[in-house]
Amino acid sequence: MLTTYADFNDSPRLVDPASRAFQSLLDKFAPTDATVLIVGETGTGKEVVARYLHHNSARRHGPFLAVNCGALAESLAEAELFGHEKGAFTGATQAHPGWFESAQGGTLLLDEIGELSLPLQVKLLRVLQEREFTRVGSRKPIKVDVRVIAATHVDLAQAIRERRFREDLFYRLNIAVVPLPPLRQRREDIPVLAQHFLNLYSRRLGRPARRLSSEALEALLEYSWPGNIRELENTLHNAVLLSREEILTPAQLRLAGYSEHRFADVPDSSLDNFLRQHLANEPHQLFDRVVNSLINSALELTDNNQTQAATLLGISRHTLRTHLANQGVIKGRRKSSSAPQTTSLMSPTGERELRIGYQKFGNLGVLKARQSLEQCFAQQGVNVLWSEFPAGPQLLYALQNNEIDFGTTGEVPPIFAQSSGNAVTYIAWEPPAPSSVGIVVPSESDITTLADLRGKRISVNKGSNVHWLLLQLLDEAGIGLDEIKVVYAPPKYPLTVSDYLAVDAWMMWDPLLSAAENNPTLRIIANGEGRVRNHQFYLARRDYVQQHDDIVHQLVEALQQTGQFIDSHRQQSAMLLAQELGLETHSVERALSRRSHQTRAMAFEVIREQQTIADRFYALGLINKPVRVRDAVWQFSSTSRLRA
């Protein structure tokens, strides 16, 4: 049985008794059409189990689709699941099939079903009972032949007691249950899975085969694996990526809480006695001393990299920063007000704050790595706080909710933000980089031209620059949006085989696109050249820039200086970013070379180009109201002008 994100034809043979037990269960359930409920912790491989059931059933030649119920927007969830008719709601300019209709004749995985809203639970129950549904805006029922597999990490019995999950739906799903044991209960599988992942990523990254030292294997066996198989896969992928040696040691695995002088070697009784003694003598100091020592040691081991230190400790970066604020190492972050537009924008200490949202690339990524901004503002009593985001839409959501004050995105996210009432303000922009975005397919894919995209599943981050590129590519090929299946998901690299099975093509941007170019198992069929401009914009909350025009002006000047540094010291800049990104330096350097990093004041021509994109998205019904881009462009005071 395949319990990893690996190829079905190249799956490891698992040996643990717990694995063999649910393997037997799956082999019984797979040939049937019974609804299956998969229950397990995050990272145990629930989607892969669902694919195993599908590929070993009579439906194997039909589609397999997976939808994350927790990611469905409340207002559009019903339309996404069951489809909608033209005119069913504002923006519905054409009829569109939903997930159930698209999975006709195959299998539909409803992942994280415990997150489904109660009204949709009622509609889902009807589909399971009657095998029919009705599109939004229609009265005509549609018969459907779909096998439903549900998955959850939530205790549904507890959810029923808390009235968050319907009891009748639970009984309808609870026909064939597959309990997935966590990896810590399947330790005999760890060596097999570990070697499988080492082989897999050595091959994909074009590296010589890697082996685990006996100490490294022991570390894997002793570790608790809170993230289960997904964490094991990511750990070994990272080790192969960063290691240059054939034999991996425990230090190269970077397991949280493990070192060659293992804490586990200290007898429990000795540790207990030590703690009791200090609790008796200085109880009010012990907790802080232990926590501070752990944090300081983790930061020392990771060269003060907060993200890596948090991973080493098994906590989130936000939790780590809270501890650091308590220690006085960094300034504490104020809580968001319920009325963000009227906040004083001051820290609890009376200092002004600048909260920047960034992605690990471009001017802001290098500016953060060099820490020059902190040095610039320290003398002015301005506290700089950084928050990392996976993509522009998520960053602008944080901007709208007063979690950050300033950030950078591509050309499309601010249009979506402005249409939703976000008081986003354009501050500056950078020249276009059309070759920094593209569409990627597997090298053996039958997709060789844009026309071959018809009927395919394409992954795209909704409201991003590559969303705009996708529309342009479809136009060029004469393909309508209703002729493809769009799967909304943030871009990622490297891709797992689960990703290969889920969609046929991925919309990507740099530096991930540049890294994908180095992968012989992938190829780029088109980029943005001659199709999109792919500008980069710097944006701020309107109320922040109104009150702190001087801070924003100095920040943009720092970005202009950083852009000059990047363009004149490209290799050094790439080295600063590569470790944070987990990518090869030459891939990052190539991505940096594909764009100019010269930050400029907003200009008429770029505003006009933004308006063209906004009008197109409104015409397609992808935003719910027209926007005027120029209304969101900030005009600095006459004493604070930016270089054009």
Image (spheres, rainbow, N blue to C red):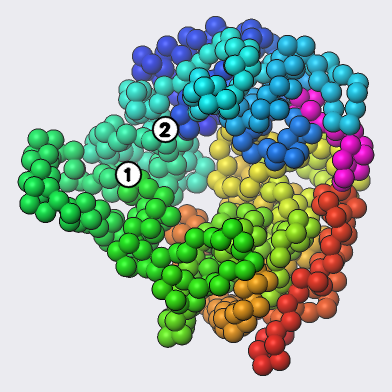
Q: Is residue 373 magenta?
A: no
Left-right relation of 550 to 625: left
Residue positioned 71% across, 65% down in the render: 423
| Quarter where residue 497 is shown | top right
Of residue 509 and residue 523, the one placed in the foreground of this image is 509
Residue 214 percent location from the top left of the image? 24, 36
Viewer can see residue 266:
yes
As shown in the figure, which amino acid type bears the numbered disc 2? Asn
Question: Residue 342 location, x and y as percent?
Answer: 62, 68
Q: Which residue is mark 1?
A: 255
> Is 11 rendered above or below residue 630?
above
Q: Residue at x 89, y 37 (%)?
A: 88
Q: Tell me if I can see residue 359 in this picture.
A: no
Indicate yes or no whether the magenta region holds residue 92. Answer: yes
Residue type indicated by callout 1 = Leu
Residue 345 lies left or right of residue 21; in this view the side is right
Q: Could you give the CA–CA distance between mark 1 and mark 2, rounded to whole angstroms?
A: 13 Å
In the image, which residues are magenta? Answer: 82-101
Q: Work out whether residue 483 or residue 179 is closer to the camera in this orientation and state it.
A: 179
Does residue 111 lie above or below 551 as drawn? above
Q: SS at mark 2?
A: helix
Q: Tag 1: Cα neighbours inside 10 Å, few (<14), some, or many (≥20)?
A: many
In-front residue for pair 275/85: 275
Q: Quadrant of residue 596?
A: bottom right
How crowded is the residue under tag 2: few (<14 C-alpha within 10 Å), some, or many (20+)? some
- Magenta-colored segment: predominant secondary structure: loop
User: Residue lying furthest bottom in this view?
Assistant: 639
Residue bearing the label numbered 2: 228
Q: Could you say where residue 93 lies in the image, as x and y percent from the top left?
A: 91, 43
The residue under the point 9% across, 35% down is 269
Q: Residue at x 29, y 31 (%)?
A: 221
